[in-house]
Amino acid sequence: MSGRERRLVRVEGVVQGVGFRPFVYALANRLGVTGQVRNDSSGVLLDVEADPDTLARFIAAVRAQAPPLAVVEKVESTVADPVGWPAFAIVASQTQAQRNTLVSADSATCADCLAELDDPADRRYQYPFVNCTNCGPRFTIVKDVPYDRPFTTMAKFPICARCETEYHDPADRRFHAQPVCCPDCGPRLDLLDSAGQPLAGPSLPTAAEMLRAGAVLAIKGIGGYHLAVLATDEPAVATLRSRKHREDKPFAVMVATVDDAREWCSLDAAARKLLSGWRRPIVLCDRREGTALAKSVAPGNRQLGLMLAYTPLHHLLLRAVGGPIVLTSGNTSDEPIAYEDADALARLGTIADAFLTHDRPIHIRTDDSVARSVGGRPMMIRRSRGYVPEPLTLRPETPQPLLACGAEQKNTFCLAKGRHAFVSHHIGDLENYQTLRSYTEGIAHFGRLFDIEPAVVAHDLHPEYLSTKYAMELENVELVGVQHHHAHIASCLADNGESGPVIGVAFDGTGFGTDGTIWGGEFLLADLVGFTRVGRLAPVAMPGGAAAIKQPWRMAAAYLDAAGIDDFSVLSQRHEGDWSTVVTMARRGINAPLTSSAGRLLDAVAAIVGVREAINYEGQAAVELEQLADRTEKGHYRLAVLDGETLEVQGVDLVRAVADDVRAGVPGPVIAARVHNGLVDLVVRVCGQLRDRTGVDVVALSGGVFQNLLLVEGVVAGLGGAGFRVLTHSRVPPNDGGISFGQAAVAAARLSGRP
Amino acid sequence: SSHGAGGKATHTLIEAIFAPAFSNPLLDKMEDSAALTVGDARLAFTTDSYVVSPIFFPGGNIGDLAVNGTVNDLSVAGATPLYLSAGFILEEGFPVADLQRIVDSMAAAAAAAGVQIVTGDTKVVQRGKADGCYINTSGVGVREHSTDFGVDQVKPGDVVIVSGPIGDHGVTVMLARGELDIMSDITSDTAAVNGLVARLLAGTNGVRAMRDATRGGVATILNEVAKGANVAVVVNEAAVPVRTEVRGASELLGIDPLYVACEGRIVVIVAGDCADEALAAMRSHPLGEQAAVIGKVVDDPPGLVLLNTTFGGTRIVDLLVGDPLPRIC
Ligand SMILES: [Fe+3]
Ligand SMILES: [Mg+2]
Ligand SMILES: [Zn+2]
Ligand SMILES: [Zn+2]
């Protein structure tokens, strides 16, 4: 075989469970390459022979033509002595001690599978678990690596002869698709009553009929149970709200197609792309007015969380129902989503009238992801199903394996090794015990999957965060404390592949500062390693601590008092008896910690405008203030900035201006717009001053407040106009869900900079 | 400062400084009082210092607090309190009339509890070096019961009882500082619990552990139980007795009654099958009329206190590291 060359090619990235070996097999046969391909714990290993030109074309194509779900990160080849492979073959996986392989995220049903679902001649016609190499459950069913059926929750379904033939046929699109199954051998659908007893009749049509009749259904999905009602049925939606103890927080709505989505919302190109892509997050879109959607789906919200069907079951159900359904996480408020069958029955039995469920276990709970389009670019709000566990890139990479523990609420953790940062699925609020347990179990699971035993542990500085306490109790690790807002800015830097220095604007609700007060309206001169606090909102008291977060009227009381306004009777009369006590608490520091939080300033303003005085979900007052704002109003309030080593923004100026306008009878929407425009003006001005001081002309925007569309779009435009380069979030959320990634980036930078 | 707030910071100080320096088998048990054997006598010995501000508050003052506190530390060890010492540190210029009031109420509290103050000491420090009046009391009691109480006796299946509504003392003191114009009828719960404990121990043999819920409140005690016995304590929020006025004031102040100090309330862990007789015995005493089962001991998750909220959630009631700072967004 003269003229033939042999190469050993190692491919790393998301290359298992995504149809990579069949792709290689087909490619090799097309080009006339012989040899073999196998999965191992580091990815895919090719042992190939051909003439040098063909080999070069083959290796280039391995990267360039990879299947849709694959992410090829690295292709390395070494020359070897030819052995004369007669043909090309796929060989069985081997388990190795070293694990570097990447598990792919769960994917929405592909077009080919949907076509089968609709084809009466196909043996998987209307089978609610149809999937293939290019689609279906992945992360949520994987128990261990390598990604092979015995290590997934599909192991309990013995594969039938026909499925096995497809599984072994390199020409089939189910070749080595681990969850492959059919009506003969795969999972089965079941419809149970709220006590877990089977209901008579065919499951899917009966379930659809119940939804049409106004019932609440629990539906087992990819990452957990959802609760569903017909989205156009006001009494049904209201029933769901009251049973779930969820008062105002908007529900997401699932529709079948992009055309259906257009009926309820107007979509830009980016939103359309987000909606219809294989990751299928909930996408926050501007809703149309005067639709038949039930009022209590998203009360008082200009936007609606929409998602397209992403499992065959969803597709079948939506067709049978014939309209959009509310699809919200299967839990009561503050609890994690139910994903185990017995637990779901126990916890959701009082909420759901029936359970549409199946016998394919979910190994790891994963909530729906949430995203939106900001200026034509995607912004993650919650990064979970469809994205996790795809790694993000750390630059510099971490010299030691590390764990970043994340924040307290909207917690995610992050395990990192080398350049790979594995940010976890959305864990939730750690104060809830079930959530804390899924946190510790999740860390162990990720550690096994990606073979990461952390030597370094990054954590927040808040001593009461349960994530901080978790870090403190670990043994034989090096601890790296990362200030909350530095982590926010670092997450934005790393999201953009940058390392600073930048002017970081971190606006959020609450974060523990290095001076022991609560921060949240911060201007940091920052890079990945460290930061200087170069500007802040002037601190004000939070009378009652956490109570001041849940009751924005308290922040109004503190701010009005700080602004020297003692006769704002519109508000104070409604809290007669308590108002003066709360003011005294603020003045004397009685259970009234100081805060520079931008979120609290927005809360105060929202209460003064009359939008909301007590909240039922996080950030509600600020969200409703944003909704209220008149988009055509261009006026703004001006906040003075006191000079000094640290610039100090006078939040009281905003409060005073708002109070004056309220008393003058200026309409709420106008005031709300001027508030937002005022904050935009402020950020642009302060950044200008800081650029003059430091010469830095790049700004990073992070923190939950920058989920506010009016603010983020205004600030991006304003800073752009002033000649700044602006970094915003796209892959990790600006809220505390991004903290773990920021902590990991800071720890990696500190470790790699160490002599 | 947060050292002394009764949370984790205090624990750390004790663990880091005092425990290693003074280590001995009696101290190392870290109970509220030491169980001594002197000759044939089984004794309990304890000490506590009182720095409450303000010194006078509705329902009591620093004097009866100092007597009751030490009596209670002995009582919850299962001892009959007998003799107390009293040490005073007075700021120069502290009004004699105030001192007289304090001492009178100490005498009355001692008489009510059936103990004698048998030794004492007084120091006067310069103006500004102390805040009016501090009192230290030590106490000796005799352990007549053969049962050994202790957190290490707690087992899954036990139940948790509180002797009455919680949070009265802490909220009273906060309001008594006079900075807040809250009108309220709330008074401190300061009282000696030795009579209540005697009634309880006469009524049941099932007591595993007893604590008086002082600094850090019931939440801190339950964390000590959970961590000390390596068990989980599950509290039912709806069952925790809190006076309406105390709940209202707590909500206004933004504090959690579970973490608020009491000075005449005990937390008792009893074997599950003795819960009814223990409750009946406590309710037969005036200080225990509103005693209630608030939770149970289970094996999992070890070391944690969980609160089943009225909404059906399960919240972790953690030991506070320092002053409570909001951690929600
Ligand atoms: Fe934050
Ligand atoms: Mg003591
Ligand atoms: Zn497919
Ligand atoms: Zn089959």
Image: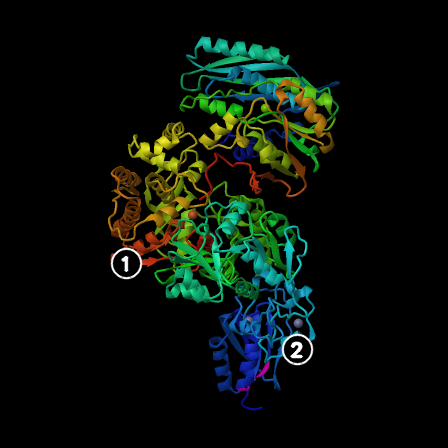
Q: Is mark 1 on a helix, strand or loop?
A: helix
The foreground one among B121 and B304 is B304
| Mark 2 secondary-structure assignment | helix
Could you tell which of marks 1 and 2 lies nearer the N-terminus?
Answer: 2
Residue at (48% x, 56% y) in the render:
A231
- Coloring scheme of the render? rainbow
Q: Which amino acid does label 2 sit on?
A: Thr
10 Å crowding of disc 2: few (<14), some (14-19), many (20+): some
Figure label count:
2
Q: Name the residue under label 1.
A: A720
Task: Look at the image and tell me whether residue A496 can be seen.
Answer: no
Identify which residue, B324 or A168, lies in the foreground.
Answer: A168
Q: Which image quarter is the C terminus of chain B in?
A: top left
The image quadrant in which ligand 4 is located: bottom right
Q: Which of the chains bears the disc numbered 1?
A: A
Callouts 1 and 2 on one subunit: yes
The residue range painted magenta reads A31-35
Q: Which chain carries label 2?
A: A
Residue A548, quarter of picture? top left
Task: Give the percent coordinates (x, y) of residue A270.
Answer: 39, 64
Q: How far apart are marks 1 and 2 (CA)?
A: 58 Å
Provide the residue designation for mark 2. Answer: A165
- Residue A367 in the image: above or below residue A177: above
- Between B305 and A117, the residue placed more toward the observer is A117
Q: Residue B271's x, y, as percent? A: 72, 32
Residue type (three-letter) at the residue carrying disc 1: Gly
Residue A470: x %, y % from top left: 55, 46
